[in-house]
Amino acid sequence: MQDTPVTIAPAAPEELEAIRALVDAAYRPYVPRMGLLPGPMRDDYAAHLAAGRLLVLRAAGQVAGLLVLIDAPGHLLLDNVAVAGEAQGRGYGRRLMDHAEAEALRRGYDRIRLYTHVSMVENIAIYARRGYEETHRAEVNGLHRIYMEKRLR
């Protein structure tokens, strides 16, 4: 699988079912820990697609990861990053994060922001290692979130 062609590009409407399945598989393990559905499992991916905010990582032509990027005042919001379970361990998460940060710069932002649930400690550690710093915490729709930011310049 080392030579598998990998691309990151806008999602296509026919990929919505695969995208929803990927999100469900990626976030379902957190449900018992959180006691409720994580935010990404509540999202409207057809709306993200229609708005041009949904990108997919394709490996050998199959959806193996995704990004939801939202333009916001003064920054790019990395609203979601997920990798299919069977595709984990191949560096796809790093590629997606690198792409999001490069896209923020391409769009003229000097910072990128994200948020995650406080119980997703593994993700928080990954983001911190990448240079993201906590800015604040808040509760949104019953979800206890940690907000993080990375300055890109």
Image: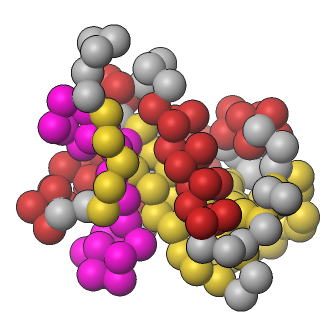
Would residue 104 be found to the left or right of residue 67 on screen? right
For the image, the number of numbered tags is 0
Farthest residue, direction left: 14
Residue pictured at 77% horizontal, 38% vertical: 130
Q: Quadrant of residue 119?
A: top right
Q: Is residue 110 left or right of residue 49?
A: right
Return the x and y of residue 150 as percentages of the image width and height.
81, 56
Decide which of 130, 124 is in the foreground and name it. 130
**Colour approach in the figure:** secondary structure
Relative vertical location of residue 21 with respect to residue 15 in this rendering, above or below:
above
Q: Residue at x 58, y 45 (%)?
A: 97
Q: Relative to 9, is 62 on the left or the right? A: left
Magenta region includes residue 33 = no
Magenta part of the protein: which range?
Answer: 45-65
Q: x, y percentage for residue 144?
A: 73, 63
Residue 112 vertical position relative to residue 102 in the rendered view, above or below: below
Question: Whole-percent x and y of residue 76?
Answer: 65, 71
Q: Position of residue 8 (x, y in %)?
A: 36, 48
- Identify which residue, 7 or 140, lies in the foreground: 7
* Residue found at x 60% / y 73%: 107
| Figure quadrant of the C terminus | bottom right
**Furthest-bottom residue in view?**
73
Residue at 19% x, 49% y is: 18
Figure quadrant of the N terminus:
top left
